[in-house]
Image (tube, coloured by chain):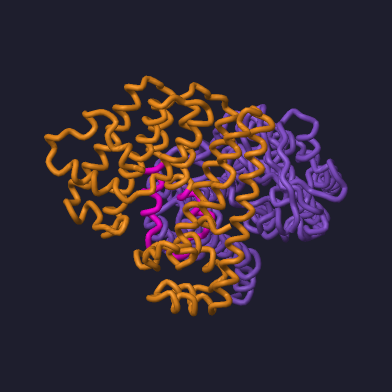
Chain colours: A orange, B purple
Amino acid sequence: MSRVFKIHNPQDFPKYLPRLNSLYDDLFSGGKGFRAQLVQKVGSQIQLTEKPMHLLAQTVEFIHNASLLHDDLVDRSILRRGKPAAWTQYSPEYAVLAGDYLLARVMVNLSAHGNIRLVQYTAEVISELLEGEWLQDSVIRDFDVNLEKLDRIHNLKTASLFKWCLRAPFYAAEKSDAKLHEILEKLGFILGSLFQRSDDLLDYDIRNFEKKAVLGDLRAGYLNSFAAFLAQDLNQAQKNQLVKSQTLDEFKKNVGGVDRFDQGLKAFDELNQSQIELYHHLLSVLTSTIDKSYSALAHQLQPLPDLLYFRAQK
Amino acid sequence: MKHRFETATRGELRFDQLISGQFSKTERAIPVQSLLVGELKEEVTFKIVDRSSLPQLTWASMFRKTVKARHLLLVLFPLFYFLITNWNKPNLSSLEIIFIAAGLVVSFFAVQLKIDTQDFISGYDRLRDSKSLSLLKTGSVGVSEVQARIQKLAGVAFGFGLIPLILEPFRIFSLIGTGVLFYFGYFYGSQKKNRFFRDLCLSLTAGPLLAFGILPLVESLVFGFVWSFFIFFSLQIDHFQNYFEQTRAKERNLITSQSFDQSAQTLWWVWGSSIMAFSIWSLFTSQISVWLGTVLIITYFSFQWRKKLLLIKSPVGSDIEKVCMQGHQLYLIFLLLWATELLFKAWLAPLVFLWAQ
């Protein structure tokens, strides 16, 4: 899916830059292109024409992949989508430059489109995303960080792009009603937050259907949202023990046993279920108070939280 | 807990009913999300829950959840100071002390509730996305109930305050000054979204004006001025602890007008200035050996705290809360030292003097 959005115009990835095209080929292949699909879902419901829709889908994939290039280097992650991360396969310098280049292309392509509000909003989102990355790095090895603080980071780092996927098509369609955008912003926040929390659960082998590696966050010194939720009732000694866990079984033991772990998961799911209910309520507000014609869009967006959080289990 | 969601827009009757809690006798509305917060057409989504599922609030639990001990100390310590320094003088009668103390506690409680209610109705607490959940934000109590209690508290505070005022009519100047500063500081400061002026007014209100209200003498104003540094510090450390939330909400004050790293330095300088103000003033009012002991001990603890303060890595990490907690402890250590110094000067020193003779 993402590969479709690689070339927007021939100038995006000039042939004379050595290794650039192969780096992007590796990077863009394997991704699910979920964000691009979300843009298309929204765009198609508000009758956005193909050209701006393609531009938006490409934009979100460029921004997302630029963040992955930088993120992998910052986190020293050696794998991305099951393959060697760009900074290991090419060089850290190329990874940084390739990420920068993608962001530059975003601005070139969007500004050529000529919608200044869209350009401004996109620049704000890129800035928020980087703020989130920066803040996340500032809490590495902070094992007392709580869920509320992590939510603030994830709101910037993860949810900002989800918000963009919902709002940008409306800006592209010259629809900038403040209330509409506030609702979309809140919906995007919930989707981003659920996506992040679901991703954090994978690290503890929960609904890990793709069989991703476990305990990666903890080993990298990062207490993710689920771990922070489980650790909130532990004392300092128990917490110190918890963060030293080398295997998932050891982690479960340190958290107070398998039953305690399962109870924690149930409580975490309930917490997120209430966010899903709020999401559905906001969708009803979207159709009842903004415009009834958005009911088809609301219908399209309805299954997303369950899909993102419960990974289509429900 | 069974619940449903309902969304209403500011200006509508339904919004007023939900925000004030007067829409139902059996349910309560808790704001969970706001759209266009801070604007005239703010739209709030409320979580409607059954009242029976929420804990009943007594006066005591309401007080405990509204008034922080360290904040209460800001208004009670001056009273303690004047009590100790005037225990053998005819300036303050025990009747006055009892009524002033009771009046201060009750009016402080009422003011805290009033501020919480205003922030809740105006949406300021939603704008800040504050982590410190007021009673109203958690749904433990409704606005109309809090307002009824504020009226009762104001009546009681007025009753307590009347007696010291009759005994010493000069106290009226303190009340007038407090009213003027409160008006300019709170209302003007809130409108401008710049809290520096408000912090300054609050510090002067709870500093020189409060001191003059307790004991209407010129010396009280000097003590109150020194005390206002510590009140100012207490306000700034709260801003520092909420640095991220406040900067994201574009709230301006002394701390948030600077970068995060600089703000830690500024907080240190505010504390350093407070200690400096105390040291200079105390030099003229204390015995040199006691003065030296107090200043040395607090300087030692202050520099210990400074090390940790300047090492804070993140405005969203856990360090900031830990170090701010230590800052509050430092402030309590300082008060303890000051109280010990006062007690020593008032009671122990004369005893030692008598024993030596």
**Residue B202 screen position, x and y as percent:** 62, 40
Q: Is residue B38 left or right of residue A209?
A: right
Placement of the N terminus of chain A among the 4 image quadrants: top left
Tell me residue B9's x, y (percent). Answer: 71, 32
Please give left or right for residue A262 compared with residue A38 in the image.
right
Give above or below for B148 relative to B285: above
| Residue for point 40% across, 57% down | A139
Residue lying at 74% horizontally and 28% vertically, measured from the top left: B11
Report the residue at 79% width, 59% height from top.
Answer: B53
Front position in the image: B132 or B34: B34
Image coords of residue B79 (percent x, y): 70, 54
Residue B24 spot, x, y in % from top left: 85, 45
Q: Nearer the viewer, residue B148 or B183?
A: B148
Residue located at (60% from left, 73% from top): B352
Q: Does the segment drawn in magenta span residue A25?
A: no
**Residue A112 picture quarter:** top left
Asked whether residue A237 appears in the rendered view, the answer is yes
